[in-house]
Image (cartoon, rainbow, N blue to C red):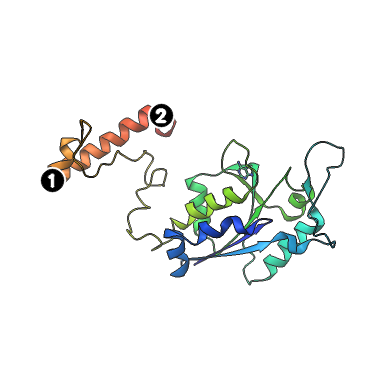
Amino acid sequence: MIQFDVLTLFPLIFDGFLSESILKNAIESGKLSVQLHNMRNWATDKHSTMDDRPFGGGPGMVLKVDCVVPCVESVRGGCGVAGRLIMLSPQGRKFDQRLAESFAVEERLILLCGRYEGFDERVVELLEPEEVSIGDYVLNGGEVAAMVLIEAVMRLLPGALGDCDSNRLDSFSSGNRLLDCAQYTRPREYRGLNVPETLLNGNHAEIEKWRNENSLQRTKLRRPDLLN
Ligand code: ADE
């Protein structure tokens, strides 16, 4: 069981994500829990202001240190385990399968989602979160990045997926540095395109060999960097 605490200004973004399909089942069967915390509840004025203009000028708004730090401290203190504090930010370490694997063995992950121009830098100085980016592009905020992280981590939890092998064989997992092979299902022929003969003949050794070769070819072509 792993507990995610998500600190966000927009908790409703997570509604559909948490209430459908594999994630819903994993939550219902107790493999993980996700607690959403609206950071606005820690605003200090009557307008619930969480952000302010940057010192020195410039566009956008900055999330206020005197709201965010008490919010994190309060959420952290709300449970016996302090947990690993992760700030989603385009300035962070690039998220990958290895980092997901290291998160999947934790008891508690606290995910801090930024918005606007980001957090006052003193949030980072005081709380020393691990900053994590899901890629070299800029999103409107950390929420989608937090969902990416939650989904990648939950796939690694024992028993969270129906088929116990399906995560071990995922591309990028420690035991596998190749892209997945091509997959086909019925019909055998569609608009003149046929399913490779080998996959139809029931010879499992040959099928396994075809799949390994297909994986290797695709990796060479699309992601040669993975082979180095
Ligand atoms: N917030 C905005 N852009 C992001 C990114 N690429 N990764 C993580 N958090 C973000």
Residue 76 location in percent, x, y? 68, 65
Residue at 65%, 43% (x, y): give it. Answer: 140
Residue 202 is labelled as 1
Query: Residue 93's quadrant in the figure?
Result: top right
Residue 134 is labelled as none
Whether 105 is drawn above or below 203: the answer is below
Residue of label 2: 224
SS of the residue at dot 2? helix
The residue mark sitting in front, 1 or 2, is 1
Q: Residues within 10 Å of mark 1 (few under 14, many from 20)?
A: few
**Which residue of the protein is positioned furthest toward the right in this rendering?**
56
Could you say which is closer to the camera, residue 121 or residue 52?
Answer: 52
Residue 202 location in percent, x, y? 13, 46
Residue 19 location in percent, x, y? 49, 62
Judged left or right of residue 121, residue 209 is: left
Quarter containing the C terminus: top left
Residue at 66%, 54% (x, y): give it. Answer: 112
Answer whether labels 1 and 2 touch (C-beta < 8 Å): no
Residue at 87%, 38% (x, y): give it. Answer: 56
Residue 176 location in percent, x, y? 37, 43
Residue at 55%, 60% (x, y): give it. Answer: 15
Query: Residue 177's quadrant in the figure?
Result: top left
Judged from the image, the quadrant occupied by ligand 1 is top right
SS of the residue at dot 1? loop
Could you say which is closer to the camera, residue 214 or residue 197?
Answer: 197
Q: Amino acid at mark 2?
A: Pro
| Gap between marks 1 and 2 measured at Cα | 31 Å
Q: Amino acid at mark 1?
A: Gly
Query: Residue 47's quadrant in the figure?
Result: bottom right
Could you say which is closer to the camera, residue 38 or residue 124?
Answer: 38
